[in-house]
Amino acid sequence: MPESVQLAHPTPREAFNRGMRELLPAGPGVIAWGIVTGVAMVKSGLTVPEAIGLSLAAYAGSAQLAALPLIASVAPLWLVFVTALIVNLRFVVYSAAVRPYFQSLPARYRLSLGYIIGDIMFVKFTNLMQNEPRYHRPIAYYCGGAVCNWLIWQAASIAGIVLAKEIPPAWGLELAGTLALVALVVPLCRQYATLVGALISATVAVLAHGLPLRLGLLLGLLSGMAAAFWADRRRDAGMGS
């Protein structure tokens, strides 16, 4: 069978393996952030079982890191909840974007796929669909990368939880994890609305850093979302005129 046909019509296993392969280069960044999050949970006062339970249940590193300082400072529960919710609102956008490819599946399968969605795999999947719109096994590809990402994250997070007292700050894992996220975010900023939202969010968060209860982070998130929405609406209005 010609190679072009094999690529266009892979078996489910081939598509699953491709998703794993294309996710693996991001593995070092996922490992760094997983360890950082695991260490942060323990040093914020959670017990090892509590931290492991949170990692498995939430599977949302950015929301966990945003909520942990609030938990440690005994912030009101509503603020912890709202902060985590807003940080994770991007997954609503992700889910809406990939819905056309999964809408034929039963609800229980869609819920499972929603649980394992992540930033890196979303970017990989949408790039695949843009570059190869007729790819024959998108669900298998998605599952391969998403499961790989989940396994790497949980292994790294649990390692950070268990070894929290043994990992010295001099390792600089926070910087490694931040650089990995920057590498992911920068390509997304090619879109005008995303760029505007990222710039406004970062600026407001820095300027409001001194607010109590980490409200600067929440304010930055809300400002960035509003700015991105405004920029997107303005672009659509300009295209329609």
Image (tube, rainbow, N blue to C red):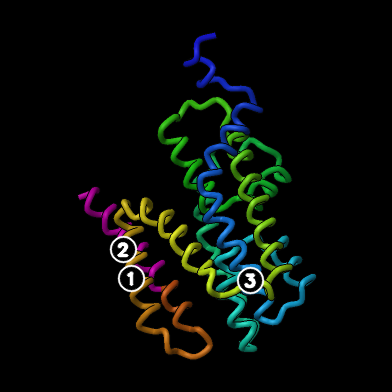
Q: Which residue is mark 3?
A: 167
Give the residue displayed 54% in from the left and 53% down from the top. 28
Image coordinates for residue 135, horizontal then vertical, percent: 51, 27
Q: Where 3 sits versus 63, above or below?
A: above
Mark 3 and mark 2 residues within 8 Å of each other at the beta carbon = no
User: Residue tagged by mark 1?
Assistant: 200
Which residue is at a point 51% across and 49% down the rendered structure image? 26
Front position in the image: 193 or 171: 171
Q: Residue 73: where, in percent of width, then height?
A: 61, 88
Specify the quadrant that holds the N terminus: top right
How far apart are the two marked residues, 1 and 3, measured between alpha carbons? 34 Å
The residue range painted magenta reads 223-241
Element on which disc 2 rests: helix
Q: Element type at marker 3?
A: loop
Q: Residues at badges 1 and 2 in contact (C-beta under 8 Å)?
A: yes
Residue 130, by quadrant, is top left
Q: Is residue 238 magenta?
A: yes
Residue beneath the point at 51% across and 50% down? 120
Coordinates of residue 231 in the picture (x, y in percent): 30, 61
Among numbered discs 1 and 3, the one appearing first in the sequence: 3
Expressed as whole percent of the image width and height from the top left, the position of residue 171 reads 54, 69
Q: Is residue 121 visible?
A: yes
Identify which residue, 21 or 142, lies in the foreground. Answer: 21
Query: Marks 1 and 2, how far apart in space?
Result: 6 Å
Kind of residue at disc 1: Ile
